[in-house]
Image (cartoon, rainbow, N blue to C red):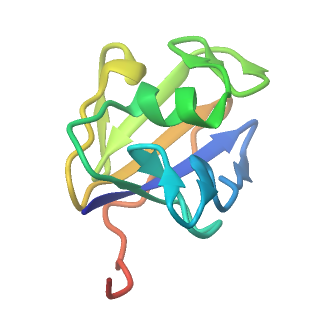
Amino acid sequence: MRRVHLELFANGFAVVIPARVGVRSARCRAHEWTDTPTGVVRFDRAARLGDVFAVWGMPFGRRRLLSFHGAVSLFRNGLRVCGDPAAMPLRDGDELVLETGPYVPPHRSFLFPPQ
């Protein structure tokens, strides 16, 4: 099982990713899911950032982050990434930050809890 840490910022405020995104029951879950509201997203196959939002059922793209409209910036391990954020492949251990609105300095890393 692989995991990334995903942080969302809209209009300068943190947005919490809820627990149990992609989880229906203990034995039924999507390929991308959350267990807790910490921003840790687990995935068990090759996936893209857009897959997480599709499973969550929330809008996401170059100019949309959840219910917020405007240019969306993506940072991977503290470095800005250009292009379509939904197409970004998920890589185990990455710290991903999505922002719309004012700039919030992105974190470069995340200390994952033991599995």
Looking at the image, can residue 105 be seen? no
Number of disc labels: 0
* Residue drawn at the location 42% of the way across and 45% of the way down: 32
- Where residue 22 appears, as percent x and y from the top left, is 57, 46
* Residue drawn at the location 55% of the way across and 26% of the way down: 54
Which residue extends farthest bottom? 114
* Residue drawn at the location 20% of the way across and 47% of the way down: 91
- Where residue 23 appears, as percent x and y from the top left, is 59, 53
Based on the displayed image, in which of its 4 quarters is residue 81 positioned?
top left
- Where residue 75 appears, as percent x and y from the top left, is 37, 40
Q: In this view, does 84 lie to the left or right of 92?
A: right
Query: Which residue is at the front of the view, 87 or 109?
Result: 87
Q: Is residue 89 left or right of residue 69?
A: left
The quadrant of the picture occupied by the C terminus is bottom left
Query: Which residue is at the front of the view, 75 or 88?
Result: 88
Looking at the image, can residue 97 be seen? yes
- Where residue 5 appears, as percent x and y from the top left, is 41, 59
Q: In this view, does 78 lie to the left or right of 35?
A: left
The quadrant of the picture occupied by the N terminus is bottom left
Q: In this view, does 9 lie above or below 40?
A: above
* Residue drawn at the location 71% of the way across and 28% of the way down: 66
Q: Is residue 32 left or right of residue 76?
A: right
Which residue extends farthest front? 27
Query: Which residue is at the front of the view, 69 or 101?
Result: 69
Query: Which residue is at the front of the view, 110 or 44?
Result: 44
Q: In this view, does 33 lie above or below 61?
A: below
Based on the displayed image, in which of its 4 quarters is residue 25 positioned?
bottom right
